[in-house]
Amino acid sequence: MMNARTQLANEGPTRAGIGALESVRAFADRELPKLVRKIDGEGYYPEGVLRELGQLGAYSQHLPGYSTIIDLNAAVDAMSAVAEHCVSSAFCMWCQDALAWYIFASDNEELKRDVGFRIAQGDVLGGTGLSNPMKAFCDIEPMRLKGAEAPGGYIVKGVLPYVSNLGTAHYFGAVFEVTSPGGVTRNVMAIVPCAAPGLSLVETAKFAALDGTGTFVVQMRDVFVPRAWILADPIDDYLKKIRAGFILLQSGMAFGLARDCIRLMEQTRPALGHVNKFLDEQPEELAEQLDHIQSQAAALAATPFEEDLEYWRAVLRARLSAGEASMKAAHGAMLHCGARGYVATAAAQRRLREAYFVAIVTPATKQLRKMIADLATD
Ligand SMILES: Cc1cc2nc3c(=O)[nH]c(=O)nc-3n(C[C@H](O)[C@H](O)[C@H](O)COP(=O)(O)OP(=O)(O)OC[C@H]3O[C@@H](n4cnc5c(N)ncnc54)[C@H](O)[C@@H]3O)c2cc1C
């Protein structure tokens, strides 16, 4: 339940948000440049960095009932400050933000007081296995986790092909489908500890980027999910509550990445400006577009619990624009940097690989377009 003193931050970042952002930015500027190649090239999972970011307040600004103001924009800004250096780390932040968002948007007070509080602080880490249900709710693929009612909870089985920001002591949000004895199906959402008996984390194939994100295949073989871990049963109304926040928070990855790509383009100007000026993508134009998308997303993030269909359509469009802007900026950075950006250790080629992740992580560009098209026919 929302704390009585909790308000939405609808007039720009709060003082607490600004304080956390400044600390996060200073920390990211200091720590990430020396780690980013190891994260990208060796698949190093920066667990210590992620914990430290939690201590600086990066994961707690947007949580209903945790602080007095729900400041999604502060969470987005913190994530974007990290994404300016490394999208892998920023994505892990999003995983953490989303997990905390699920808990604090639920009615499960016990979870908030216990593990929720520790997740908000970065003391406990974790992620979200919601790609599959989000695609299932959009008629893209079937539900992969099935639950059966059992005394005190549910027995859940199935496989999720990718869940990030995980380790043996981590947690993640999951949705499973339950069919009642009468044949009626409903979806239930819970948080699940990776240490639960019957749950295994299996290494995935090496990715083109985002390999340092603690991403695993999650296998659940008759995992007992007690009622104490349930976030919503059934999920329907709760899903409407969390979906805008889930999507808008992702824009932090896109904004930070695009800002760095614009900077990369500008840096080439003294040496290559005489020829780069013939390219279609120019930093001034991209920066202007980015500013516009950022202000639209910020306005939407000020009211994440709005239920209006027009609001939801605008959220989907904003996320689509953010993803497309980051891909355009990364493409531009690659062209502006030329061969120096094509070197295996160069930032431009890494940024381009990272940008494609923003476009394929759920909801992917194609799913967003489908969702927007489906809304038009509803
Ligand atoms: C690095 C990384 C981290 C991710 N982290 C998370 C996370 O934390 N939580 C989460 O829920 N999801 C996560 N995902 C999944 C992601 O959000 C998308 O769902 C996924 O990228 C597929 O999206 P899609 O739009 O391509 O799906 P679709 O086009 O619908 O196709 C995906 C289908 O292809 C299958 N498939 C997957 N890999 C292959 C392959 N190599 N060959 C053939 N088929 C394949 C999938 O099982 C799925 O059924 C992650 C993905 C990546 C790459």
Image (spheres, rainbow, N blue to C red):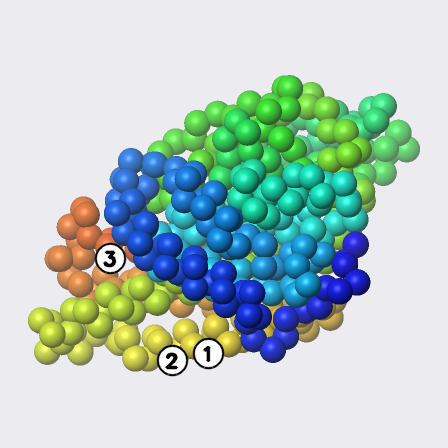
Q: Is residue 220 above or below residue 27?
A: above
Question: Could you tell me which residue is drawn at 39 percent across and 47 percent down?
Answer: 88
Q: Which residue is mark 2?
A: 288
The reply to whether discs 1 and 2 touch (Cβ–Cβ < 8 Å) is: yes
> Counting other residues with Cα less than 10 Å from the Cα at mark 2, is it few (<14), some (14-19), or many (20 or more)?
few
Question: From where the camera sits, is residue 365 visible?
Answer: no
Query: Front-most of 287 and 308?
Result: 287
Question: Could you tell me which residue is drawn at 65 percent across and 33 percent down?
Answer: 192
Q: Which residue is mark 3?
A: 348
Amino acid under disc 2:
Glu
How many angstroms separate mark 2 from mark 3 (CA)? 21 Å
Q: Which residue is mark 1?
A: 292
**Quadrant of the rendered image containing residue 72:** bottom right
> x%, y% of residue 19?
49, 65
Amino acid under disc 1:
His
> x%, y% of residue 270?
11, 74
How many angstroms separate mark 1 from mark 2 (CA)? 6 Å
SS class of the residue under badge 1?
A: helix
Amino acid under disc 3:
Ala
**Quadrant of the rendered image containing residue 214:** top left
In which quadrant will I find the C terminus?
bottom right
| Mark 3 vs 1, N-terminal side | 1
| Mark 2 vs 3, N-terminal side | 2
